Amino acid sequence: MSILKVRLRAGHVLRIDARTAVVCAVLAVLSLAVVLAALCYGSGWDRPGDVLAALRGEGPIRVSVTQWRMPRVVAALVFGAALGLAGAIFQNLTRNPLGAPDIIGLDAGAYTGVLLVFSLTVASEATITLAAIGGGLGAALVVYLLSAGGGFSGLRLIVIGIGIQAVLTAVNSWIILRSDLDIAISASVWQAGSLNGLDWVDIDAPVTVIVALSGLLVVLARPLHQAALGDELAVTSGITLPRLRILLVLIGVGLSATVTAVAGPIVFIALSAPQIGRRLAAAAGVPLLPAALTGAFLLTGSDLIAQSLLAPTMLPVGVVTTGVGGLYLLWLLTKEIRR
C-alpha cells in the first residue's frame, strides 16, 4: 500500500494512503460537478456561465441561484456527508456493513420523537430537533440494552435493531392514524424525506450543528478506527471503550437525527455511502472522509434526479434513495448470506 507523507512543522509527518487520497479527490470533483448541474437546473437549464455569474452577484438569475437553488444544494451536500459519517460510525462500532441508523431503528426512533411533537405540542424548529435527537437516543439505548449480552458488535445487535425498526415503524403508523387529518398529511409527506422548499433560514442551525459534531468526530477518528480493529487492541492502546462508545453514539445519533429533523428520514444513504467509500478506497475499516464524500455525492445526485425525473413535479429525494438503496441492500444481504 503506497503512502503519501506530508511533513509538517516541528518534525511531524502526516501519513496518507495514496489510494484514499485519490478516491477523495475524485469524489470531491464529482460532487462539485453535480453541484454545478443542480445550480443550473430550475424551470429549465441555465448555462454554467450564467450560474457562475450569479454566484458572483451578477446577472438576471442571481436571486434564483443564490436564494432558491443554493440552499437546497448546500443542504444536500451537508446532509449527505452527515448521513455518510453517521453510517461510518455505527458500521465501525458494530463491525457490520448493516450497522446503519436507518437499519437498526435509530432513524425510526427520531421520527417517533418528531411525530409526538406534532401530535402533542406546538412544533417549532427547536422542539422538532430535540425530539428527533431524543427519539434516536432512546432507540439506541433500547437496542444496546437488548443486545448487551452479545456485546456492542456482531449480528445480534443488527437483528435486534431491525426488530426495533419494525416495532417503531408500526408505532409511527399508529400515531399518524390517530392524529388529526392535517397533521397526518403533513407527517406522511415529511416521512418521505425531502429537500423541497428548504431556505437559508431552515438550514443555518442544522448545518452549524453538523459541522460542530463533525469536528468532534475528527478528534475521535483515530480511537474509532482502533476500536473497530477489536476490543483487545483498543484497550491495550489506552482507549476507554465505554466512554468512547457513548461519545460516538451521541455523535452518530446527533448527525442522523439533525438531518431527520429538517428533511425527514432520508433512507439508505447512511447504509450505502460508507461501504461504497470503503470499497473504492480499498480500506480495511470504514474510513470517515470517503464515507462523507460518497454520502454528499449520492444525496446531491439523488436530489437532482428527484427534481428532474417527473419535472415539473419534484419528487421527495427519499423516493430516489429508497429505490437505489433497496437494490444495494439486496446485493449486500445476498453477499452477507453467502459469506
Image: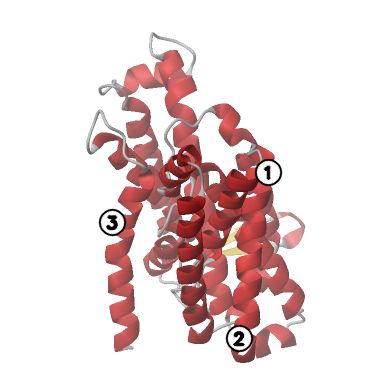
Q: Residue at x 49, y 32 (%)?
A: 198
Which residue does the numbered mark 1 point to in the structure image? 127
Query: Disc 2 marks which amino acid?
Result: Gly
**N-terminal of the two: label 1 or label 3?**
1
Quadrant of residue 118 within the rendered picture: top right
Which residue does the numbered mark 2 point to in the structure image? 230
- Crowding around mark 2 (Cα neighbors within 10 Å: few <14, some 14 to 19, many 20+) is few
Residue 223, placed above or below residue 150: above
Query: Disc 1 marks which amino acid?
Result: Thr
Q: Residue at x 77, y 58 (%)?
A: 10
Q: Residue at x 39, y 63 (%)?
A: 272
Query: Disc 3 marks which amino acid?
Result: Gly
Q: Quadrant of the C terminus?
A: bottom left
Q: Disc 1 on helix, strand or loop?
A: helix
Which residue does the numbered mark 3 point to in the structure image? 323
Q: Residue at x 33, y 74 (%)?
A: 332
Q: For marks 1 and 3, give the one nearer the viewer.
A: 1
- Crowding around mark 1 (Cα neighbors within 10 Å: few <14, some 14 to 19, many 20+) is some
Asked if residue 48 lies left or right of residue 200, the reply is: left
